[in-house]
Image (spheres, helix red, strand yellow):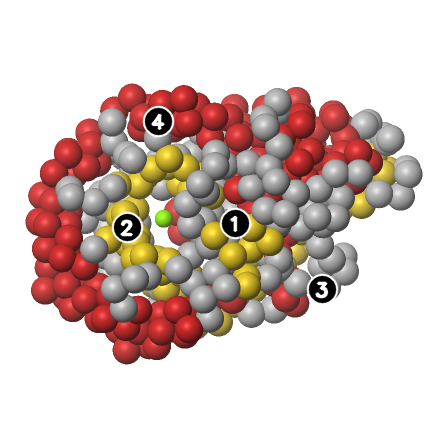
Amino acid sequence: MKITGLNWFPYCLPFADAFGTAQAALKVREGFIVRLETASGLVGLGDAAPLPEFGGGYPADVERWLSELTPGLVNQTPEAVRPVVARLRKNRGPGAAASAFALETAAFDVLAQAAGLPLSLWLAATYGLSPPSADLSVPVNATIGQPDIAVACETARQAVASGFGCVKLKVGMETGVAGEVERVGAIRQAIGPDVKLRLDANGGWAVPQAIEMLMALAQFDLELVEQPVTAADLEGLARVRRSAKMPIAADEPVISLETAENIIQTGAADFLIIKPMVVGGLGAGLEIIEMARLAGVGCIVTTTIDSAVGIAAALHLAANLPASIPFCGLATASLLNGPLVENAPPVVAGQMQVPKKPGLGFDLAFPV
Ligand SMILES: [Mg+2]
């Protein structure tokens, strides 16, 4: 099975609503759908949408990588993508992780199709993991990023009404404890006592501020808090974790197997947030999940708010989390507008059914 074509198509998907984070307000997601075609007629898809706002590089960086690497892959088997992905993971420069994710996903998509397996089961077989149930659903959280409290509450109410069991709220945009207490308290009231509530501060607080903040916010029965302090300060994150009543998750510093290992060794987190498009692919994600499992640290898989291709790939990875899968951040299609999110695996009653067809197992609404 030879690669006969490797092409990429730019996309730009606007956010459906104002989306705030402690680092930046996000307006659009820009990237590329990568399309890998084989001589046998199989087509594999990948998604490369780096997050410039979080240091992931720009689409132009991805385009440079793809232009440089494609000539060496055409006329090779899809397996030839593996050393290329390893090189990109090692490089870690702008756009490298997103490019690795896209190329690897497209290659794994055709390899899984050729094997007649959904990508989730193909990954388990390839990486020597116990196979996920063929009828698996992954519980997912709703993500609330509207800076306006009233709008955020209305979105949270709608999410609960449609069956979500967990809401993740972006925080770190308010100044001071009183503002955050008002925001988080309003959301807790909107969703009621039984729905899980997690916060994501995207590194927006200094260490003493985070300690004070989490003490004041503990009254709202928080499931966990993501990245209360900056990614660069693992010792600080560990200090916040020791003083906090709720579990702490590390997100922004999880960019490779090595950084994930540092987080675990520093005792900085109860959970790691795994984004396959940030750590350099599904294989990298599986390696981190296995390392964390052995260390007794939980993992949550999320997207970086991508096209349906990125969402589906992340879902197949999440299906390989150890049993009792936590709520994962995959229900992000509704945050964007455009044809490339339309056919994302649907969320039904707060769960995403893992596609059962071979490969990624879904049809893009907008064929490339
Ligand atoms: Mg996060």
Q: Are marks 4 and 2 in contact (CB under 8 Å)?
A: no
Location of residue 98 in the rendering, given as x and y in whole percent from the top left corner = 55, 41
**Which mark identifies residue 223?**
2
User: For numbered disc 2, what is the local secondary structure?
Assistant: strand
What amino acid is labelled 4 in the image? Gly
Q: Check disc 1 and give the amino acid type.
A: Val
| Residue neighbourhood size for the residue with mark 2, other residues' Cα within 10 Å, grouped as few (<14), some (14–19), many (≥20) | some
Q: Which is in the foreground here, disc 2 or disc 3? A: 2
* Residue indicated by mark 3: 365
Q: Residue at x 56, y 45 (%)?
A: 314
- Residue at image position (55%, 63%) is 348
**Residue at 41% in and 22% down:** 294
Q: Nearer the viewer, residue 23 or 366?
A: 366
In the image, which disc is placed on residue 352?
none
Name the image quarter holding residue 182: bottom left
Q: Is residue 185 visible?
A: yes
* Residue highlighted by disc 4: 296
For marks 3 and 1, give the one nearer the viewer: 1
Q: CA distance from mark 4 to mark 3?
A: 40 Å
Q: Which mark is residue 138?
A: 1
Structural distance between the alpha carbons of marks 2 and 1: 18 Å
Residue 55 location (% of width, % of height): 41, 43
Residue 331 appears left or right of 338: left
Which residue is rendered at x = 32% and y = 61% of the image? 195
Which circle's residue, 2 or 3, is located before the other in the chain?
Answer: 2
Q: Nearer the viewer, residue 107 or 215?
A: 215
Tell whether label 4 touches label 1 (CB within 8 Å): no
Of the numbered discs 1 and 4, the one sitting upstream in the chain is 1
